């Protein structure tokens, strides 16, 4: 009789402990991968403003970027460490010094630009994409200034930039965006993040490294 009571008490203790573990001890959430990406584009196309908007900073106060600036943007699935390079002529000639070790590339375009300005942007984009350190990296093109009259759509920009020719070389996506459209801008990043994580997994498998944490 006494033994039965002891057994029941022991079972109750195990049950209570399991319940306590289930409710209170879920353990820390899995660590999100930290991914380093570059943000390029001609001067004044809105790189700093969009990055400030996404990280919740005041985007009305941005100054032209001298050299480079780094911003961490938190998403559910990863943390993007974005290195923005200034787009002025003097900084642009040194862009390629920053390519080493990057895991993805964001290219911002002013969709209201003239054909001449867009040709210029296309030449700079091509130059970057053809660089050996950038080869194969996922690409996000942001067709910014969609809140301005006369802006070309993301489809029109995609055709102009001949992005289709990248399809066999890397995963890419284009997103129309503006400072008035945080949600739309974020949706482009969510697709981009998936590509970045795919690419990380692919590279980890090639190098025989362990799995990455995918939340
Ligand atoms: N109307 C409108 N203005 C924008 C938009 N995005 C950026 N701007 C404005 O464009 C100007 C230049 O923006 P920046 O973010 O400094 O541009 P940037 O590409 O970082 O320029 P650099 O750092 O010089 O290479 C700022 O006055 C922004 O407020 C947009 O979507 N719509
Ligand atoms: Mg800037």
Image: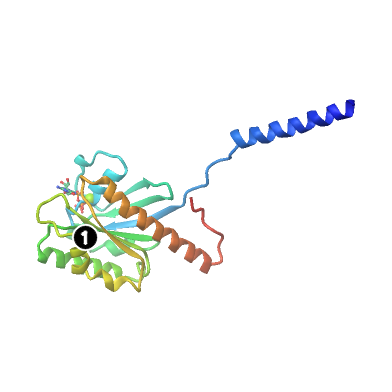
Q: Is residue 106 left or right of residue 154?
A: right
Number of labelled discs? 1
- Which quadrant of the figure contains the N terminus? top right
State the image coordinates of residue 179 (x, y, percent, origin top left): 21, 46
Identify the image quadrant of residue 40.
bottom left
Identify the image quadrant of residue 197.
bottom left
Q: Is residue 52 visible?
A: no
Which residue is rendered at x = 35% and y = 74% of the image? 168
State the image coordinates of residue 37 (x, y, percent, origin top left): 36, 57
State the image coordinates of residue 59 (x, y, percent, origin top left): 23, 42
Q: Is residue 59 above or below residue 192?
A: above
State the image coordinates of residue 169 (x, y, percent, origin top left): 35, 72
Q: Secondary structure at mark 1?
A: helix
Q: Is residue 145 above or below residue 205?
A: above
Crowdedness near tag 1: few (<14), some (14–19) or many (≥20) residues, C-alpha within 10 Å: many
Which residue is rendered at x = 36% and y = 66% of the image? 171
Q: How is the image coloured?
A: rainbow
Which residue is rendered at x = 51% and y = 53% of the image? 213
Identify the image quadrant of residue 52.
top left
Q: Is residue 211 visible?
A: yes
Q: Is residue 106 left or right of residue 74?
A: left
Q: Which residue is mark 1?
A: 154
Whether the residue under disc 1 has CB within 8 Å of ligand 1: no
Q: Is residue 16 left or right of residue 154?
A: right
Which residue is rendered at x = 64% and y = 32% of the image? 20
């Amino acid at each position: 009789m006494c033994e039965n009571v002891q057994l029941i008490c022991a079972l109750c203790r195990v049950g209570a402990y399991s319940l306590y573990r289930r409710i209170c001890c879920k353990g820390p959430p899995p660590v999100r991968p930290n991914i380093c990406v570059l943000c390029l584009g001609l001067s004044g196309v809105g790189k700093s403003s969009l990055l400030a908007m996404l990280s919740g900073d005041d985007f009305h106060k941005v100054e032209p970027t001298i050299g480079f600036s780094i911003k961490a943007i938190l998403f559910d699935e990863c943390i993007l460490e974005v290195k923005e390079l200034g787009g002025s002529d003097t900084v642009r000639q040194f862009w390629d010094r920053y390519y080493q070790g990057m895991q993805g590339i964001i290219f911002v375009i002013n969709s209201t630009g003239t054909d001449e300005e867009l040709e210029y942007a296309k030449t700079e984009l091509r130059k970057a994409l053809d660089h050996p350190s950038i080869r194969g990296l996922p690409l996000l093109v942001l067709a910014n200034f969609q809140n301005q009259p006369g802006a070309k759509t993301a489809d029109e920009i995609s055709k102009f930039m001949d992005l289709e020719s990248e399809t066999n070389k890397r995963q890419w996506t284009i997103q129309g965006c503006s400072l008035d459209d945080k949600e739309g801008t974020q949706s482009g990043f969510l697709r981009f993040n998936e590509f970045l994580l795919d690419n990380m997994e692919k590279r980890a498998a090639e190098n025989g490294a362990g799995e990455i944490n995918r939340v």
